Image: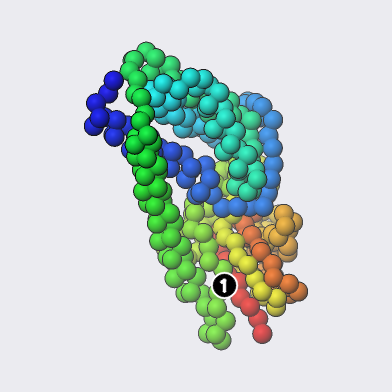
């Protein structure tokens, strides 16, 4: 039996770990209105095609749940495999329900494997902790406290993007309504990297052998006339900026054309993406802006 001090340390770390998992898998993600489902071993098909990123994702999914297996086994929980599977299933269902990611059966497999590996390690080392009710309160408090850190960071990042968006307010008084999310990353399953620069612009660089996207913002607009621009001088069907609503492309890509103007008859939620195409080999700077006209 571990000492009371070690009990508190264990429970605090476990709460921090749960908060981190929820942040990585749910809270840090931007909803895309896209819902999709991938069958088992889809990632291995991609790996056999020469894609390396699915392999890293599989390893990451295993590593993500190893601490869960350790904590469950150390706490004397029976059926670690089932608990790991249920926890992973819950995350995947929430991602699918709120359009925060793709429901991937491979994630279930690798998360569960990670939990089993963690439990196996504890079995080899030995040791067990019995959680008293006060220890469960420590876990909950640790989760709450540790959750405030990433949420605070996201708010700081958002305020920074608000200030950068204001740089592009027009001299005629029209305000740039598009506050970008400031989140760097690769367009899904490609080597095209989307990076935010300190002046509020976006650097898009890399290659792709498929159609793909990377979300850079979302906004809700009232009825009226609007203009959307920020990228020009690129070939058609190479790279562009795209508006989407209700899982459908809302307007032609900005890039091949300099500007899109549109009128909304009702309040509408729009997603904004960097879109790339098969054969993309790009190194461009975009400054996405959106104004209400008139």
145 up-or-down from 226: above or below: above
Say if residue 104 shows up in the picture.
yes
* In this rendering, position of residue 145 left or right of residue 217: left
267 up-or-down from 253: above or below: below
The residue at 33%/18% (across/down) is: 127
The residue at 38%/18% (across/down) is: 122
Say if residue 197 shows up in the picture.
no
The residue at 66%/74% (across/down) is: 222
Classify residue 133 by image quadrant: top left
Image coordinates for residue 6, horizontal then vertical, percent: 26, 29
Nearest the eye: 209 or 5: 5
Classify residue 130 by image quadrant: top left
Quarter that holds the N terminus:
top left
Q: How many marks?
A: 1
Q: Residue furthest top?
A: 124
Image coordinates for residue 90, horizontal then vertical, percent: 58, 36
Classify residue 121 by image quadrant: top left
Nearest the eye: 67 or 181: 67
Q: How was this image coloured?
A: rainbow
Q: Residue furthest front?
A: 133
The residue at 29%/30% (across/down) is: 7
Category of crowding for the residue at label 1, using alpha-carbon neighbours closer than 10 angstroms: few (below 14), some (14–19), many (at least 20): many
Nearest the eye: 47 or 283: 47
Image coordinates for residue 102, horizontal then vertical, percent: 64, 41
Quarter that holds the C terminus:
bottom right
**Which residue does the numbered mark 1 point to in the structure image?**
177
* Secondary element at tag 1: loop
Image coordinates for residue 180, horizontal then vertical, percent: 53, 62
């Amino acid at each position: 039996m571990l000492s009371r001090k070690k009990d508190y340390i264990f429970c605090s770390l476990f709460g921090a770990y749960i908060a981190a998992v929820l942040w990585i898998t749910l809270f840090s993600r931007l909803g895309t209105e896209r819902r999709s489902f991938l069958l088992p071993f889809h990632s291995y098909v991609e790996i056999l095609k020469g894609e390396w990123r699915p392999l890293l994702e599989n390893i990451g999914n295993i590593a993500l749940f190893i601490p869960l297996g350790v904590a469950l086994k150390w706490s004397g929980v029976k059926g670690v495999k089932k608990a790991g599977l249920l926890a992973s299933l819950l995350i995947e269902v929430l991602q699918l329900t709120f359009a925060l990611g793709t429901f991937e059966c491979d994630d279930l497999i690798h998360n569960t494997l990670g939990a089993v590996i963690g439990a196996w390690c504890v079995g080899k080392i030995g040791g067990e902790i019995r959680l008293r009710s006060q220890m469960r309160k420590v876990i909950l408090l640790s989760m709450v406290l540790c959750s405030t850190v990433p949420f605070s960071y996201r708010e700081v990042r958002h305020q920074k993007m608000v200030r950068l968006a204001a740089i592009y307010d027009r001299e005629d008084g029209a305000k740039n309504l598009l506050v970008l999310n400031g989140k760097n990353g690769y367009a899904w399953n490609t080597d095209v990297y989307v990076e935010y620069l300190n002046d509020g612009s976006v650097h898009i660089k890399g290659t792709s052998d498929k159609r793909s996207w990377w979300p850079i913002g979302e906004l809700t607009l009232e009825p009226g006339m609007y203009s959307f621009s920020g990228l020009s001088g690129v070939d058609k069907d190479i790279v562009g900026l795209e508006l989407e609503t209700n899982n459908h492309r809302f307007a032609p890509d900005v890039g091949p054309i300099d500007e899109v103007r549109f009128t909304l008859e009702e309040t509408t939620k729009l997603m904004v993406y960097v879109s790339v195409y098969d054969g993309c080999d790009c190194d461009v700077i975009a400054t996405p802006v959106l104004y209400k006209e008139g």
